[in-house]
Image (cartoon, rainbow, N blue to C red):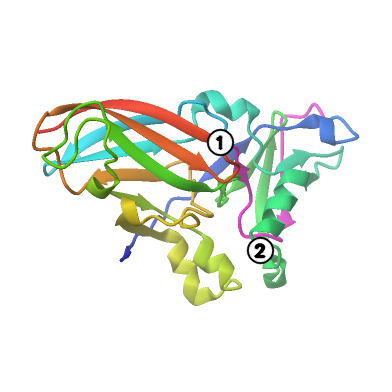
Amino acid sequence: MKNIIRYTNAVAILIAVSTIMTACPWSAPNVDEKAFSIKRNCYILGYWDIEQKFPELSYYEKDGRITIDCKLIGSDNLIRLWLGWNLCDYRYDIEPTNEFLKLSTLYGDTDYGKFGKHINVLIDNKRIWLDNAPTSFNKIITAIDITSNAVWDDTHEAGTLLNDCFEISYKSFAKYIDSGYDEEKLQTADEIIREPLNELAADDLRLVSTVLSDIPISLTTTNPPTSAKRHNLSIIFSLDDGTTRESTVEAEFP
């Protein structure tokens, strides 16, 4: 059973977007900056491309438990990611990319404009900044599998799947968007969802929150190792397009 813990994040986030000029018929003006606002037709304002071959993993220990943070968007990736918007003409307009519109339709996030809300935009040095913009992944992580190169305990030999020894933590926009933007469901977009990793369903990680100040996905031990204390953990992320991403992290348990 999933345990949901309310988490309030009061920090406004400015999201930087690399501008893709090829989709626009005009070149951007050579001006320092321009601020304006646009009508917000979707709740999610961009989708990060999971294109890293080896996602960045790090870990920390607290109260005898190890937590592995999975950073699926690396700083080296930012220049070739699209966040949904293109700079568009001498009037400082911006327009959504075709990929963004397809994903918004796929996830049913197309009717937010009925609220008449706007989003603040800043164009600075030909880059687009959106104020406090919710973002997600452009692909669904359908499964996460963990193994170790060492014996974990009496029932987990080296190379054995360790999903029953970890829980996963993440945030998701899915309940709010699926509800048709029910205000009572809005708080669920800022709640931390925790569940046993071996109970993760294929669509649970749909519309995961990827706010840059947070780690999108964390994995924490529920059954720590009783044999070897040092483990080279391999984590495989399976995506809905049939591809996988794999990384390893060397962790030393207390």
- Say which residue label 2 marks: 108
Q: Please give left or right for residue 183 compared with residue 188 in the image.
A: right
Q: Count all numbered tags in the image, as a single digit.
A: 2
Q: Residue at x 91, y 35 (%)?
A: 25
Q: Closest to the observer: 94 or 42?
A: 42
Q: Where residue 243 is drawn, which disc sits there?
A: 1
Type of amino acid under label 1: Thr
Percent x, y for residue 230?
Answer: 16, 26
Q: Secondary structure at mark 2?
A: loop
Residue 68 falls within the magenta-colored stretch: no
Q: Quadrant of residue 114?
A: bottom right
Percent x, y for residue 186?
Answer: 49, 68
Q: Closest to the observer: 211 or 204?
A: 204
Q: Please give left or right for residue 75 compared with residue 87 in the image.
A: left
**Is residue 36 visible in this depiction of the protein?**
no
Q: CA distance from mark 2 to mark 1?
A: 24 Å
Q: Vertically, is 43 above or below 244?
A: below
Specify start and end residues of the magenta stretch as a single range.
Answer: 29-49
Percent x, y for residue 38?
Answer: 73, 55
Q: Secondary structure at mark 1?
A: loop
Q: Please give left or right for residue 207 compared with residue 81 in the image.
A: left
Q: Closest to the observer: 53 or 28?
A: 53
Which of the two labelled residues, at mark 2 and mark 1, occupies the earlier sequence position? 2
Type of amino acid under label 2: Gly
Q: Residues within 10 Å of mark 2 (few under 14, many from 20)?
A: some
Please identify the quadrant where the N terminus is shown.
bottom left
